[in-house]
Amino acid sequence: MTLQAAAESVWATVQPLLPGLTVEVVSEIDSTNTELMRRARAHRLEPVLLVAERQTQGRGRMGRDWDSQVEQPGAALTFSLGLELAPADWSGLSLAVGLAVAEALHPDIQLKWPNDLWWQGRKLAGILIETATVGTQRYAVIGIGVNIAARSPQGLRTPPAWLQELQPSWSAADTLARLVRPVVVRTLDCCANGFGPMREAFHARDYFYGKEVVCTDGLSGQACGVDAKGALLVLTAQGLQKVSSSEVSVRTPG
């Protein structure tokens, strides 16, 4: 299956959930998130899925690079979904998206708060959600990057995992076809009902659950899962504390 064929399949299954959806596949772009944010600021607020075979300036959380300039075409899947959202509470949306991706890929994939997917202590995928306010409307851009084939750890902050370790026959196109509808369903569900109903499903895949953790804001203690709004719960010497800022990174000691 090609990415274009996968995109056509995605459109057929997702368009009933997102009327007016368009799906685009480009061979190269700076960043799918950046492009959809540009469009939103130009008042182009229709739902769109933008898929790139290659990104030259991909971005992750806290301004970090997401490098998709890998050895061969199809070694990574990068795409962004843009749509208007009006949830009662934005809290937990990145966790809901991560849960959807993990559930669609493999039972053994874990979720590393707030927006990474890990396998065997290595990073498999990442999520970046950005929003733009245009008048009274709020447009969300949900960016997802997944390592598909083996890649070098050179220049990466975290050793990489790749999906073909778990699903050897899956290509980038196969993965796209399997991912988008679950992401849309979880996103709409989170907007309608909040993150709370997904909390236990998240805990079942929580990489940090029960482990000692250290946060970049100086907090340390035992991770105790997340609350109904997606905040990380950490049991410290001073009691149970909540970490909700997307600007805080969390790691295990050592």
Image (spheres, helix red, strand yellow):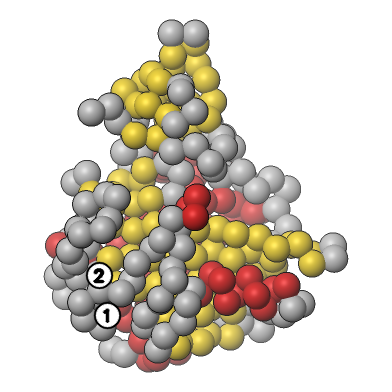
221 up-or-down from 139: above or below: above
Quadrant showing the N terminus: bottom left
Tag 1 residue: 74
Foreground: 217 or 196?
217
Q: CA distance from mark 2 to mark 1?
A: 7 Å
Say which element carries label 1. Answer: loop
Q: Residue 14's x, y, as percent?
A: 53, 77
Please tell me how crowded label 2 is: few (under 14), some (14-19), or many (20+) other residues with Cα within 10 Å: many
Q: Are marks 2 and 1 in contact (CB under 8 Å)?
A: yes
Tag 2 residue: 148
Using residue 21 as the reference point, say whether residue 221 is left or right of it.
left
Residue drawn at 46 percent across, 82 percent down: 29
Residue drawn at 50 percent across, 74 percent down: 32
Which of the two discs, 2 and 1, labels the residue nearer the N terminus? 1
Residue 200 appears in the figure: no
8 up-or-down from 149: above or below: below
What's the residue type where badge 2 is placed? Ile
Q: Residue 159's x, y, as percent?
A: 21, 52
Using residue 39 as the reference point, say whether residue 25 is left or right of it.
left
Say which element carries label 2. Answer: loop
What's the residue type where badge 1 is placed? Gly
Residue drawn at 40 percent across, 76 percent down: 55
Residue drawn at 43 percent across, 68 percent down: 58
Q: Quadrant of residue 21?
A: bottom right
